[in-house]
Image (spheres, helix red, strand yellow):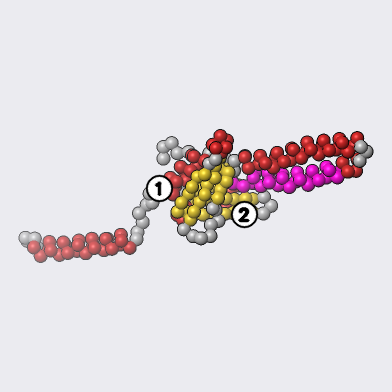
Amino acid sequence: MPGRVVYVDVPPRIVNRYLLSTERIVISVRMHPIAVISPVFVILAAAVAAGFVTELLVRSGSVRVAGVIWVLWAVLAVWQGWKVATWWRRYFVVTENRLMLITSLFDTDVGMMPLAKVTDMRLHQTTFGQVLGYAEFIVESAGQDQALSRINPVPYPSQMYQEILSLIFSPKPRGGNGGDLARDWLRGIAGCRLAWYTLRHEPGV
């Protein structure tokens, strides 16, 4: 397809283990970095606050309490750092057949939805998201249990939305079905009748 945009920001070898041998990756990206702004800000702000409190405690002679402050900060940093690591190991993957959200850190979680079951897909983008270039995909399917209902924050939202819709609404090749078989059967009968009529009515036969 001319002008088709294919995003493969994540090395395919990371997600290939969860794909079928016949599947082709169309989109493979991490979530938008806005997802880690909050934990990074918390870590830095807590470090500044801990440094300020430590200085006050050292001046007052409470060195042990200052040590406890930094232990608490370390616990907070590990907690928020886990969110950053999870973002780094979470991949949004689109193949020709399905949507996938793969999270692989210590545990692995693979959410999947076949494109054939997607009944509606909505793009929700706030003003802030328009400025920074991210949005949320809200996916609805024919079934009640949805492994992927909200995908957020998605980078390149407009381009990826159009690409996914082109996959969902692409014309499917016509395969053999009951209607095709019936038409072939009727055509065969008509051909036999024509041959029989020709043999009976053609001169010299």
SS assignment at label 2 = strand
- Work out which quarter of the rendered image holds the C terminus and state it: bottom left
Is-magenta flag for residue 71? yes
Between discs 1 and 2, the one toward the N terminus: 2
Q: Around disc 1, counting alpha carbons within 10 Å, would you say few (fewer than 14), some (14 to 19), or many (20 or more)?
A: few
- Residue at x-position 47% and y-position 46%: 164
Q: Around disc 2, counting alpha carbons within 10 Å, would you say few (fewer than 14), some (14 to 19), or many (20 or more)?
A: few
Indicate left or right for 45 with 137 as reference: right
Q: Nearer the viewer, residue 154 or 189?
A: 154
Q: Which residues are magenta?
A: 67-91
Residue 170, label in figure = 1
Q: In the picture, residue 3 is in which quadrant?
A: top left
Q: Is residue 97 above or below residue 66?
A: below
- Residue at x-position 70% and y-position 40%: 40
Examine the rendering and report whether any part of residue 133 can be seen.
no
Q: Residue 144: x, y in percent?
A: 51, 60
Q: CA distance from mark 1 to mark 2?
A: 29 Å
Q: Residue 165: x, y in percent?
A: 45, 46
Is-magenta flag for residue 17? no
Which amino acid, by three-letter code, is at mark 2?
Asp
SS assignment at label 1 = loop
Examine the rendering and report whether any part of residue 144 can be seen.
yes
Which amino acid, by three-letter code, is at mark 1?
Ser
Q: Which residue is mark 2?
A: 109
Q: Residue 112: x, y in percent?
A: 54, 54
Q: Residue 108: x, y in percent?
A: 64, 54
Q: Is residue 191 above or below residue 103?
A: below
- Residue at x-position 51% and y-position 54%: 113
